[in-house]
Amino acid sequence: MSLINIRPYTPADLNAIIALFNGSVRQVASRDYSAAQIDAWAPIAVNTRLWSERLERKPTFVAEYQSQVAGFSDLEPAGQIDMLFVHSDYQGLGVARSLMNHILLKAREQNLAELTTDASITARPFFERSGFRVLKEQDVQLRGQTFRNYRMARAL
């Protein structure tokens, strides 16, 4: 039996997901982005209502490692992966790979031709290892900061 279980998001996961996202950005992505960018990306003041709406409006998946919330991801109907984050304590244990395998399964069930994502500098190597290719570099604005990311795609 795998130590990683993927299941659908439920509203009871909201606080754990927000904490996981903030911790992942602040502790993992901080190697690739400035302090000001990190503050803009993962602000201390969190709007839980907006987070709840964002997580509930599309299929979102939670990865549990030994019954602890270790990661999450989503899959928008057109094949866009908006978020894929792994808790800083669970890096390198196959959590992201398990989430990606689940997304690939769901995408094939929906007969999607392609998956796309806007990957951070930090996430780009994972997506490349997962068969995605860079379509273009992008500079996006968020809360007064400019972020470099990569529009990526993978044919199914």
Image (tube, rainbow, N blue to C red):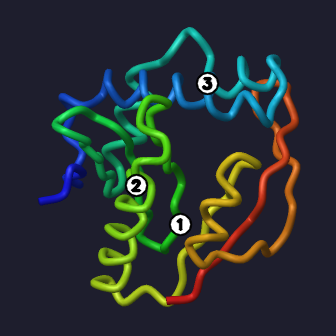
CB of mark 3 within 8 Å of CB of mark 1?
no
Residue denoted by label 1: 80
* Labelled pair 3, 2 in contact (Cβ < 8 Å): no
Q: What residue do we see at 82% from left, 38% from top?
A: 141
Q: Nearer the viewer, residue 13 or 1?
A: 1
Circle on res. 27: 3
Q: Residues within 10 Å of mark 2 (few under 14, many from 20)?
A: some
Left or right of residue 151: residue 88: left
Q: Position of residue 5 (x, y in %)?
A: 20, 52
Question: Could you tell me residue 66's position as x and y percent?
Answer: 19, 39
> Is 31 in front, or is 84?
31
**Secondary structure found at label 1:** strand
User: Residue 45 appears in which quarter of the rendering?
Assistant: top right
Closer to the chain start, of discs 3 and 1, is 3
The amino acid at mark 1 is: Gln
Query: Distance of mark 2 from mark 1, alpha carbons?
Result: 21 Å
Q: Residue at x 47, y 18 (%)?
A: 47
Mark 2 or mark 1, which is nearer to you? 2
Label 3 amino acid? Gln
Q: Quadrant of the N terminus?
A: bottom left
* Distance (Cα) linking label 3 and label 1: 25 Å
Residue 129 in the image, given as x and y percentages of width and height: 61, 70
Whichever of labels 3 and 2 marks the residue nearer the N terminus, that label is 3
- Residue 94, numbered label: 2
